[in-house]
Amino acid sequence: MGRILAIDYGQKRVGLAVTDALQISANGLDTVLVHEVLDYLERYTKKEEVEKFVIGLPKQMNGQDSDSMQYIRPFVTGLQRKFPHIELVYVDERFTSVLAHKTMLEAGLKKKDRQNKELVDKISATIILQSYLESRH
């Protein structure tokens, strides 16, 4: 059984989260720049077995795709070319940034830390992955 890796793809950065080997819990992995993410994933998948990619799917409140899909579609195409053997699943990510900020507030992080966009991206990826794990049960 391989790990499940979540990807919160943004215009500048990509938040990453990964499960433990038993696919029970989601943990923040890293935040990388958009142009470095495929190389990062290639290095990671050489060290760890990844069974599935979970991609955050940005939707508007009415259910339509958000404008961000214009960046995500080409990324997903490249991801599928580079890792054709790894299954890919989309998960609705509508409220993950809000939840990430709420999580940071509840954790007692200082305002300066809550403004760290890289941390927000990593927490958002963790929330996407956790919601995927919960949806399977």
Image: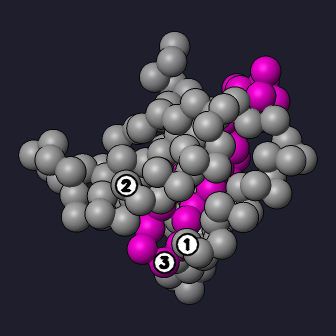
Q: Which residue is mark 3?
A: 12
Label 1 SS: helix
The numbered disc on residue 107 is: none
Q: Which residues are magenta?
A: 1-28
Expressed as whole percent of the image width and height from the top left, the position of residue 18 reads 69, 44
Query: At x 55% / y 65%, what residue is drawn?
Result: 14
Query: At x 22% / y 58%, what residue is drawn?
Result: 66
Which one is nearer the viewer's eye here, 114 or 58? 58
* Amino acid type of the residue tagged 2 in the rendering: Arg
Is there a contact, CB below 8 Å, between mark 1 and mark 3? yes
Q: Which residue is mark 2?
A: 73
Quarter of the figure with the N terminus: top right
Q: Left or right: where does residue 99 sit relative to residue 80?
A: left
Residue depth check, mark 2 versus mark 3: number of the one nearer the observer: 2
Q: In the displayed structure, would residue 39 be above or below residue 57?
A: below
Tell me which numbered mark, 2 or 1, is placed earlier along the sequence.
1
Q: In the displayed structure, would residue 12 be above or below residue 99?
A: below
Q: Left or right: where does residue 137 sit relative to residue 58?
A: right
Expressed as whole percent of the image width and height from the top left, the position of residue 31 reads 64, 68
Residue depth check, mark 2 versus mark 1: number of the one nearer the observer: 2
